[in-house]
Amino acid sequence: MDKKSRVKGYVDNNIKEKMELADSIDETVYDGTADWQFLFIVVITIFITLLLLMPKIYLRNSIYYESRAIDRLETQYGALLEEHKLLSRKVEGLKVKNQILDTLF
């Protein structure tokens, strides 16, 4: 019987501990406002982050498109310079040809 009483005492202690734990859980009241406060803090944090990063994103985007436009204009400028050189050579050739023909007549 000694063994049965020890087992019974252990079971009684275990049940007593479980009841105390259940009572302590019941005493803590769940407050739903904590979820709303956390959600509000997260939304405000995201908004502030976007507010701080938007100018940087806008400037990088603007610089990118302006550099593309500048690159396109530089390419066109280079092509026009080459065309100018070619036309200058043709004009010089026509001048030389005209001077030679003028001396023959």
Image (cartoon, rainbow, N blue to C red):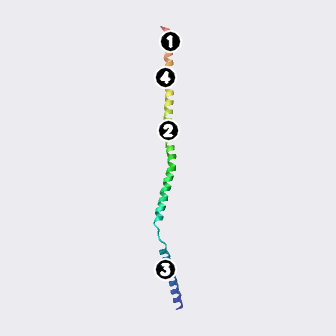
- Rendered image: mark on residue 66: 2
Distance from label 2 to label 4 (Cα)? 31 Å
How many other residues sit within 10 Å of disc 3, few (<14), some (14-19) or many (≥20)?
few
Q: CA distance from mark 4 to mark 1?
A: 20 Å
Tell me the amino acid under the disc marked 3. Answer: Met
Mark pair 4, 3: CA separation: 102 Å
Residue at horizontal 49 percent and vertical 79 percent from the top: 19
The crowding category of the residue bearing disc 4, from other C-alpha atoms within 10 Å (few below 14, some 14 to 19, many at least 20), is few
Where disc 1 sits, the SS reads helix
Rendered location of residue 86, percent (x, y) = 50, 24
- The disc placed on residue 87 is 4
Q: Amino acid at mark 2?
A: Glu
Q: Disc 2 or disc 1, which is closer to the eye?
A: 2
Q: Estimate how packed mark 1 is, as few (under 14), some (14 to 19) or many (20 or more) residues with alpha carbons within 10 Å.
A: few
Kind of residue indicated by mark 1: Ile
Mark 3 or 1 closer to N-term? 3
Residue 61 against residue 4 in the figure, above or below? above
**First in sequence: mark 2 or mark 4?**
2
